[in-house]
Image (tube, rainbow, N blue to C red):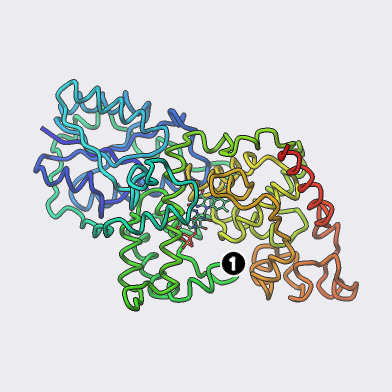
């Protein structure tokens, strides 16, 4: 009788603890995925994430097919669907890797009900270096500050080496049983139809586990040693771009950790600063997962509750200009258009556009979080909400509210030649570096030569920086009382 491996945000076969364990039992395997269109206890996936999921499911199915099996794709309420599948198959065991958001309640309830019926259920850690309960203060409480969290995490035992994929694959031989309840990826309708907005995503990404590992290897070989200096430069493709693969578990953090450390230069047992900086980013991912574990409503509730009284502005046209990349601030617009075209945005630019929405436009961070949720291929319940709260100043370990990025200065500093802006805002393609981030101050002759008519071919800034900054500081000041 078969064992069921329930795949969730771990769409890979290497370093997959639940799969490795199931294969080790010697039982015939059924590998299944359940899509709950409604999102179940959490919100539905955004459109870009659905696009990615489509590719990831097809890729996993193809991987399993090469090993003689299939991915059984089902649609419905997770708990009901898995219970029904266990009954249909007569499965004696179910294995999965753990989740840390509210869906863990579904998992706990399912675990109880299956065990009551005599089914073996075991869960594993496949998504984090350390689970939320592994890294706590001496008092047993969650850390509120990243640096202390990460120091404590780094003191823990070495990160175990990633697991290889199972050597022996035995699939449950009864496709008829499975066909009765399975659907196929096409039927999930995850891809956009009319309009088909995913052309830029298709041009940017290859979505399989093999592509994830290749991307990681290329980063480690080509960019890791310059990461510290280059990571903030959107004009250099210097970061790993593994975030969507981590989000959907086509790559595990252990694989990323070990790939980086294997290539790292160590001196006297100390990591070089590039690798140290890079693995600390994995640390932020862990810290955010732990935050979400302790604050399940992280995407909607301010961690610092006094921010509930923030006098946000209702500004639909400002929000629309921001979403479309038509704010008149070139770095902001480049970022928002990169996001729309590719489903991804460079981290420095994410911080700048988020700060612009929250501070320059004084629009509630939750509107930005929701837009990112819908448009990012790496949209992640923990990382997205925690980073938005970080920028707003209402998160656990947050940027101070009075830090208001000047989008022009940020552009000059991190895109000094304007190459990133030119790539995503073609209206500014002919602007010289000296003026590209502040074209409204450029002499007429420069604008004419660049064929730029402000207010026509490209907007004037929708808010003036100094005035917007003062307005934001005044609004934030009301929270002090
Ligand atoms: P690298 O710099 O190569 O870092 C390696 C990995 O570390 C990343 O893939 C990611 O898993 C993790 N990481 C890096 N920076 C962060 C960070 N600040 N917080 C948490 N983990 C990090 N990241 C997401 O994965 N999903 C999101 O939905 C998301 N939303 C964000 C929203 C805002 C407003 C901001 C400011 C940041 C957000 N980030 C999010 C974090 C970060 O921007 C991306 O993880 C990063 O840009 C991904 O690119 P990379 O893989 O090249 O990163």
Q: Is residue 122 above or below residue 334?
A: above
Neighbourhood count class around disc 1 (C-alpha, 10 Å): few under 14, some 14–19, many 20 upward: many
Q: Is residue 176 left or right of 347 when viewed as pictured?
A: left
In the image, 281 versus 222, the foreground residue is 281
| Residue at the far right in the pictured view | 444
Q: Is residue 430 left or right of 80 when viewed as pictured?
A: right
In the image, 279 versus 73, the foreground residue is 279
**Image quarter for residue 435?**
bottom right
Q: Residue at x 63, y 47 (%)?
A: 393
| Residue at the far front in the pictured view | 139
x then y, percent, for residue 240: 45, 64
x then y, percent, for residue 242: 43, 59
In the image, 35 versus 479, the foreground residue is 479
- Circle 1 is placed at which residue position? 234
Q: Residue at x 78, y 53 (%)?
A: 469
x then y, percent, for residue 373: 55, 43
Would the CB of label 1 be found within 8 Å of ligand 1? no
Q: Is residue 215 above or below residue 362?
A: below
Q: Quadrant of the N terminus?
A: top left
Q: Is residue 364 left or right of 31 when viewed as pictured?
A: right
Q: Secondary structure at mark 1?
A: loop
x then y, percent, for residue 11: 33, 47
Q: Is residue 176 above or below residue 46?
A: above
Q: Is residue 283 left or right of 479 when viewed as pictured?
A: left
- Report the number of numbered marks: 1
Q: Is residue 179 above or below residue 253?
A: above
**Image quarter for residue 350?**
bottom right
Q: Quadrant of the C terminus?
A: top right
**Image quarter for residue 230?**
bottom right
């Amino acid at each position: 009788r078969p064992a069921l491996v329930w795949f969730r945000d771990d769409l890979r076969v290497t370093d997959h603890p639940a799969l490795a364990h199931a294969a080790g039992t010697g039982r015939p395997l059924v590998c299944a995925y359940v899509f709950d269109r409604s999102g179940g206890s959490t919100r539905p996936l955004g459109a870009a994430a659905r696009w990615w999921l489509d590719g990831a499911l097809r890729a996993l199915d193809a991987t399993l097919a090469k090993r003689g099996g299939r991915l059984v794709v089902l649609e419905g309420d997770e708990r009901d669907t898995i219970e029904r599948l266990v009954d249909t198959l007569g499965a004696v065991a179910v294995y999965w890797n753990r989740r840390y958001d509210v869906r863990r309640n579904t998992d706990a309830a399912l675990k109880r009900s299956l065990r009551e019926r005599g089914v073996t259920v075991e869960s594993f850690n496949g998504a984090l270096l350390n689970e939320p309960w592994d890294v706590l203060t001496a008092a047993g409480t969650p850390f509120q500050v990243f640096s202390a969290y990460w120091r404590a995490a780094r003191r823990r035992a070495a990160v175990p080496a990633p697991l290889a994929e199972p050597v022996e694959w035995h699939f449950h031989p009864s496709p008829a049983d499975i066909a009765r309840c399975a659907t196929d990826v096409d039927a999930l309708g995850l891809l956009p139809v009319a309009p088909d907005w995913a052309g830029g995503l298709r041009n940017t990404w290859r979505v399989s586990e093999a592509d994830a590992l290749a991307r990681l290897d290329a980063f480690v070989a080509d960019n890791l040693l310059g990461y510290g200096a280059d990571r903030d430069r959107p004009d250099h493709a210097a970061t790993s771009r593994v975030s969507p693969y981590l989000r959907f578990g086509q790559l595990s953090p252990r694989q990323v950790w070990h790939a980086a450390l294997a290539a790292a230069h160590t001196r006297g047992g100390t990591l070089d600063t590039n690798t140290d900086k890079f693995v600390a980013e994995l640390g932020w991912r862990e810290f955010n997962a732990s935050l979400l574990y302790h604050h399940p409503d992280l995407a909607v509730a301010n961690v610092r509750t006094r921010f509930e009284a923030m006098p946000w502005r209702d500004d639909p046209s400002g929000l629309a200009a921001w979403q479309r990349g038509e704010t008149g601030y070139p770095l902001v617009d480049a970022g928002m258009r990169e996001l729309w075209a590719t489903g991804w945005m460079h981290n420095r630019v994410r911080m700048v556009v988020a700060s612009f929405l929250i501070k320059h436009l004084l629009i509630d961070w939750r509107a930005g979080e929701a837009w990112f949720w819908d448009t990012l291929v790496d949209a992640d319940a923990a990382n997205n909400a925690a980073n938005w709260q970080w920028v707003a100043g209402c998160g656990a370990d947050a940027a101070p509210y009075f830090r208001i990025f000047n989008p022009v200065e940020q552009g000059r500093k991190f895109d000094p030649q304007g190459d990133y802006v030119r790539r995503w805002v073609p209206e500014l393609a002919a602007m010289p570096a000296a003026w590209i981030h502040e074209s409204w101050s450029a002499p007429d002759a420069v604008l004419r030569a660049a064929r730029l008519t402000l207010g026509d071919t490209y907007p004037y800034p929708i808010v003036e920086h100094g005035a917007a900054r003062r307005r934001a500081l005044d609004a934030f000041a009301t929270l002090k009382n």
